Amino acid sequence: MTSFVGIDVTKTYTAAQLTGTESGKAPKVGDLYESYDNKTYRFVKYNQGAGAIAAVANNVVGFYAPGGVSTGVYNEVTSDVSDTAGLGAGVLAGAPGNGEYGWIQVSGPATLNTALVSGASGQPLVLSSTTDGTLKVAGALTD
């Protein structure tokens, strides 16, 4: 794993930058970064999914699973809930375009861009199965 100091977690990269102009300076897919305030971020690829859902900073993303069937991919994410199999991945730190790369927050307190679909803050949360890019309170431990 690479060590990073003072990175901008809102910065996004194209595939060409990762192998061209930013080669050697950019993180690698799957890299983790822990910030000074104990938040952890993972470097991932963004996929807009079948619904062509654009990335929005501070929205929730799930692991990309085409048609809702998990393929075991854990470094590619989407806001399109129909392409996630209900597996939440984190919160977008920036707004990468389709096929671009950026950071998602995977641990630590996060401020979301959208309200919870149901329930209240401080409760166990799961990816909403009805509203793209959002969370809801878990109805049961199996949600």
Image (cartoon, grey):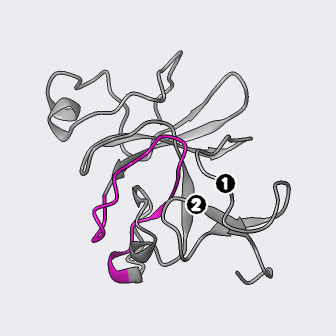
Q: Is residue 9 above or below residue 52?
A: above
27 horizontally vs 87: left or right: left
Residue at 39% x, 67% y: name it.
64
- Whether the residues at callouts 2 and 1 have beta carbons within 8 Å, the answer is yes
The x and y percentages for residue 55 are 38, 48
Question: For the residue labelled by badge 2, is the local secondary structure a helix, a strand or a loop?
Answer: loop
Amino acid type, residue under disc 1 in the picture: Ala
Residue at 19% x, 30% y: name it.
17
Q: Please give the range of residues in magenta.
A: 48-67
Residue at 32% x, 76% y: name it.
66
Q: Is residue 99 above or below residue 7?
A: below
130 horizontally vs 11: left or right: right
Question: Farthest top residue?
Answer: 6
Q: Which residue is mark 1?
A: 115
Q: Which mark is residue 90?
A: none
132 horizontally vs 53: left or right: right
Q: Which residue is mark 2?
A: 134
65 within the magenta span = yes
Q: Main secondary structure of the magenta part?
A: loop
Q: Residues within 10 Å of mark 2 (few under 14, many from 20)?
A: many
Rendered-image quadrant of the C terminus: bottom right
Mark earlier in primary sequence (2, 1): 1
| Residue 24, quarter of picture | top left
Amino acid type, residue under disc 2 in the picture: Thr
Foreground of the two, 15 or 23 = 15
Foreground of the two, 51 or 89 = 51
| Residue 29, quarter of picture | top left
Q: Nearer the viewer, mark 2 or mark 1?
A: 1
3D distance between C-alphas at marks 2 and 1:
7 Å
